[in-house]
Image (cartoon, helix red, strand yellow):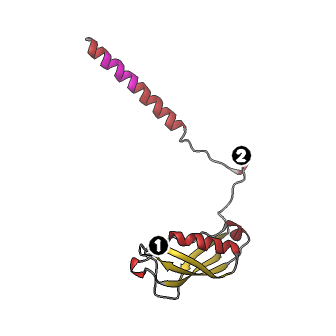
Amino acid sequence: MTASSKRFSSIYHWLTACGLAFFLLAASGCTTTTVSARSGFEVPSQGPTVRGIARWTTDEKIHPAMGVAPVYPEKMISREKEGEVSLEVMVRNTGQVAMVRVIDSTNDYFRESAIAGTRGILYDPTLAGQTFVVKAVYRIQKRP
């Protein structure tokens, strides 16, 4: 066997060993564990019975080109509180919200969530300079 073939052979075996070690290391972290009531952990029989749903609405024919729903505050979900926030928004020439003014709010938690949520809304840039009213609606949905 030549020196270069010995070198290739030893490199090949080293890489194979490293690959096998990496595989075993990765596989050992991918185990599944079944948890039951007998194992000492509390196992919920089903998911939460209450969840909060938040969405944007408007009385006008203006709808966002892109946007995410406002975040339902966890504290309000746990208290099963619902609410609404009316906001006046002005659109920049990029379609982003330039100005937000709270018109009415049922709760400060919802107010803060709605204001923060307007940062994720993108309107059609042809609406630049216009102001209109949007409403953030927060509702509780209960599972039977």
Q: Amino acid at mark 1?
A: Gln
The residue where tag 1 is placed is: 96
Q: Is residue 144 visible?
A: no
Q: Residue 68 has which mark?
A: none
Q: Is residue 97 visible?
A: yes
Q: Amino acid at mark 2?
A: Ser
Q: Taking 57 as reference, is 46 left or right?
A: right
- Span of residues in magenta: 7-15
Residue furthest toward the left? 2
Q: Nearer the viewer, mark 1 or mark 2?
A: 1
Residue shown at 53% from the left, 69% from the top: 119
Most foreground residue, 53 or 119: 119
Q: Is residue 3 magenta?
A: no
Most foreground residue, 54 or 9: 54
Magenta region's main secondary structure? helix
Q: Residue 39 has which mark?
A: 2
Q: Earlier in the sequence, mark 1 or mark 2?
A: 2
